[in-house]
Structure formats: structure tokens, C-alpha cells
Image (tube, rainbow, N blue to C red):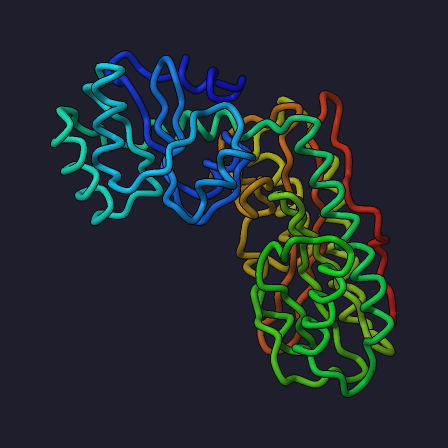
Amino acid sequence: MNLSLQLLSSMLPENADAAIIISNTNRRYFTKFVSSAGYLFLTREEAYLLVDFRYGEAAKNQADGCEVITFTELGKSLEDIIKKHHVRKVMLEGSAFTVNDAEKMDKLLSSAGAESIKSSALDTLISKMRIVKTSAEVDKMITAQRITEQALTETLKLVKEGVYEKDIALELEYKMRRLGAEGISFDLIVIAGEKTSMPHGVPGENRIKPGDFITFDVGALYQGYHSDMTRTYALGFADDKQKRVYNTVFEAQKRGLEAVRSGAVCRDVDAAARDYIYQAGFEGCFGHSTGHGVGLDIHELPFVSSKSDVTLQSGMVVTVEPGIYLSGEFGVRIEDMVVVTADGCINLATLPKELIIL
């Protein structure tokens, strides 16, 4: 087993002999192998990656820290492992198993003389491992961030009056892939004008016009790891109200970033940004969390929200993304992705945040 699998094995509770992991991201985290299906079966002595014929050859060449089994009958392969290691209780990855999946697994385990443990306990153990990033993981996220920034910088040259939001979004995704991204982190948000008051608006056939704010919430995927960044620009000009809102968000984000450090509680980081926005007269106009963890998933622990009592630790990667959204008018969001350190944070974003008029 590799070190990550050894660590998880050592963390299994006394009432569990083994664990089954089926989510794509967690299988990838532990084995470094990418597939859309498979079962990582972890005992206290050994780890097995069970895949079907589609992935057998690739898994044997690429999977790390586990024995690869190409199965024809999943139940038979599970039974062989269970008997070899005298397994009686198996933890299931609760967040990944649907009700139907769990019922099917119950039958397979029962036929082999074992039974499942259905709870969130395994998910909690894995989250504790993934929440603090290694330097190798951070390096991949930095690469994803640089791809994002270069693609956005090039795409901004195409923004002009009359251009469709959806065309800008498509061009941005194309440039990311040309620069080495294996994909986009999420459906890119490129929206303009009144639509910017919707935090997760969808690019469409809205033509960009002078005086519009344009929100770019974008991210690239590199070797499984995500980047996440938001910038808000204006086309041609911005009026006094737009400038006031923008500068309020700009200062709120600065305060949020200054609050990030190892030992800080997430709700306090959220308050640093949120309180400033509310005190500026925009209470009720900032309805989402100030940030979230990023890694193999675009949204993962910890969540930087008013309800989170999680304490930040060095090596965690989080976003800081306050915003103000005025329904029927416009919205502004500024987002950076940062690495938590002992005395603050390292900002992975390098693009300027002062209001830019395109």
C-alpha cells in the first residue's frame, strides 16, 4: 500500500475490517488512477482496485499502492478478498453509495459472509486526510490557476459591444484546453448586465453592451485538481453606483483575505468580509458563503461560512469570494484561491482586482 492508503487503513475503527470506496475523486486520490467506475477495497493488510475489462490494462499500468483485479463477476472477486482477509464488517463510502447501490452491495457482501457499515464515518476519515493539501497537490492547483489566468487574459481581448455571453464562455473554455487543461472546473459563468445579480447565472444569448458589468467565474482542471477565480469587469464605463458597489466588495475581500491564517475559525473569516458589506448598507445582498475548500472537488471542506466552526490549518486551500447582488440591476463578486499558512495565506491568483474598464 502507498502512504495514503496505509494511513486510512490505520484510521479504520475497531468495528471495521475493511472499507469500500467508489467515488471517482476518492479512488483517484488514493490510487492516482482515473476511471469512471471501480471499487477500491481496503483491508488492514492490503488494498485492491477492482475494475471491469474497460480499465483492466490501464489500471495495472497506472494504479499506485494497490493490487488490481479485473473482474468478470464482482461478487466472486469480493468473496475471494473477504475470505482471504477474514473480513466481517465493511465500511461503505456513505456519500457515494445510492440506496440502490447500497442494497446491491449488501447482497454481495452477505453472500460472501460479511456485512456493511452504513454511515458517514468513512467519508469523515477521508475528508480529514484530503482537507490539508500536500505541496504536490498545491503545485497542480497553481498550474490550473495559471492556465485560467492566461486564458482569461487572452479572452478579454474579445470582449466588446454586441458579443454574446455564451460565445465568450466557449472561447474561454477552448483556450483553457489549448493551454493544457484537461477540462473546466465547472460550467463557466460569463454573464453581463442585469444577469450579474445572479451569483450562478448561466451564459446565454445576452449581448454585452456598454455600461455592463461582466462577471467571469472561471476555473481549469489540471491533473484532477481545480482552480477557482472570479473577476468582475465593466465595458466602456461604470457609473457612481457601480463603482461604490465594486469598491465595497473589493475592500470586503481584502478584509477576508487578511483574516485567513492557521488557527482562524471559518465563521470569523466569513464575518470579516460579510460585516463590512452589511455595515456599508448592503445587508441581505450577500447571500452565499465567503468561501470553500478546493482540491480534487471544486467545492470541498472546509466551508468558509457563518455557520462553520472549522479551524483553518496550514496547507488548506480555500477561496475568499464575497459579493453584492442587487436584483434587477447588477452584481459584483471578486474571488481568489489561497493556501493557508501559519501567519496568513499565499494568494494563488495574480490578476489585478481593481476595477478595470474594458
* 289 lies left or right of 12: right
Percent across and percent down for residue 56 are: 44, 41
Query: For residue 200, what is the image quadrant?
Result: bottom right
* Nearer the observer, 250 or 3: 3
Look at the image and tell me in which quarter the C terminus lies: bottom right
* 164 lies left or right of 349: left
Image height of 318 relative to 66, above or below: below
Residue 321 can be seen in this image: no
* Nearer the observer, 322 or 275: 322
Percent across and percent down for residue 33 are: 53, 38
Percent across and percent down for residue 127 are: 47, 30
* Nearer the observer, 292 or 306: 292
* 47 lies left or right of 181: left
Q: Name the residue at 75% across, 83% down.
A: 163
Image height of 281 relative to 338, above or below: below
Q: Name the residue at 82% across, 54% down.
A: 353
Query: For residue 157, what is the image quadrant?
Result: bottom right
* 118 lies left or right of 120: left
* Nearer the observer, 100 or 274: 100
Q: Name the residue at 29% across, 32% down.
A: 92
Q: Name the residue at 70% across, 57% down.
A: 230
Residue 252 can be seen in this image: yes
Image height of 160 relative to 352, above or below: below
